[in-house]
Amino acid sequence: MTETPESEPIARFQALLDEAKRVPRSVLPEPTAFALGTVDANGQPSVRIVLLKHVDERGFVFYTNFESRKGRALLASCRAAMCFHWQPLEVQVRVEGGVTVVSDAEADAYFASRARGSQLGAWASLQSQPMTQPGDLDARVAEMEQRFAGVPVPRPPHWSGFRIAPDKIEFWKNMPSRLHVRHVYTREGARWAVQQLFP
Ligand SMILES: Cc1cc2nc3c(=O)[nH]c(=O)nc-3n(C[C@H](O)[C@H](O)[C@H](O)COP(=O)(O)O)c2cc1C
């Protein structure tokens, strides 16, 4: 096990994300997309795709409805797992860590940057709840358009960001004959220890 500087795995992740963003959209349409794994209060795991909106030394940030299935699971367990797969780069990155809610100021700033249609959608969608009739969503969108006509759309109280503070980050690189290279960084206080794993 080798000790590494505090910034190393995040800098390595950012370099890969930058590389993924340089791939043409026709080849890699959503470079910030990742699979988010959560566990609910009954121990039931679930996974879905969300978009990474920010990453720095504090962790990985994405936004969602806190009353959704994932929102409830994260608020209960305070733990998450993430997996990025950038197929054109032949790279996979896995992250595990503790979850906190971003500050209201951070969530407000991001919400304000979104298109108005998405802002209204955040109010209209009762994410993960059953719809009684197929037209329910359109009706709620129309209701929100009326409610906020002519005024800026504020951030809904149930909509914000989660920050996943990594305590484990694994970089996987495809190699011939499936002799892939895996480096796993484990947080040890302010530093990271790195180990290579068998593929
Ligand atoms: C490419 C892609 C990006 C997505 N981005 C988000 C996102 O950033 N936030 C979000 O709440 N849902 C996002 N979704 C929808 C989620 O995958 C999921 O359907 C939704 O959040 C409800 O999940 P839940 O019922 O497990 O909470 C995205 C889906 C796809 C396919």
Image: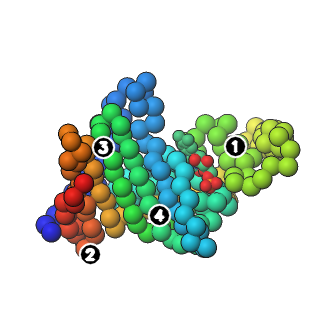
Tag 3: amino acid = Val
Of circles 1 and 4, the one toward us is: 4
User: How far from the left and from the top, in percent, is residue 181?
Assistant: 21, 50
Residue where numbered disc 2 is placed = 189
CA–CA distance in space, label 3 to label 2? 27 Å
Instruction: Give yes or no for contact between labels 1 and 2 (Cβ–Cβ under 8 Å).
Output: no
Q: Helix, strand, or loop for circle 3?
A: strand
Which residue occupies 19% across, 64% down?
195
Tag 1: Cα neighbours inside 10 Å, few (<14), some, or many (≥20)?
Answer: some
Of circles 1 and 3, the one toward us is: 3
Of circles 3 and 4, the one toward us is: 3
Which residue occupies 36% across, 55% down?
94
Residue where numbered disc 3 is placed = 91
Q: State which quadrant residue 139 falls in.
A: top right
Among numbered discs 1 and 2, the one appearing first in the sequence: 1
Tag 4: amino acid = Ala
Q: Helix, strand, or loop for circle 4?
A: strand
CA–CA distance in space, label 4 to label 2? 19 Å
Q: Quadrant of the C terminus?
A: bottom left
Residue where numbered disc 1 is placed = 121
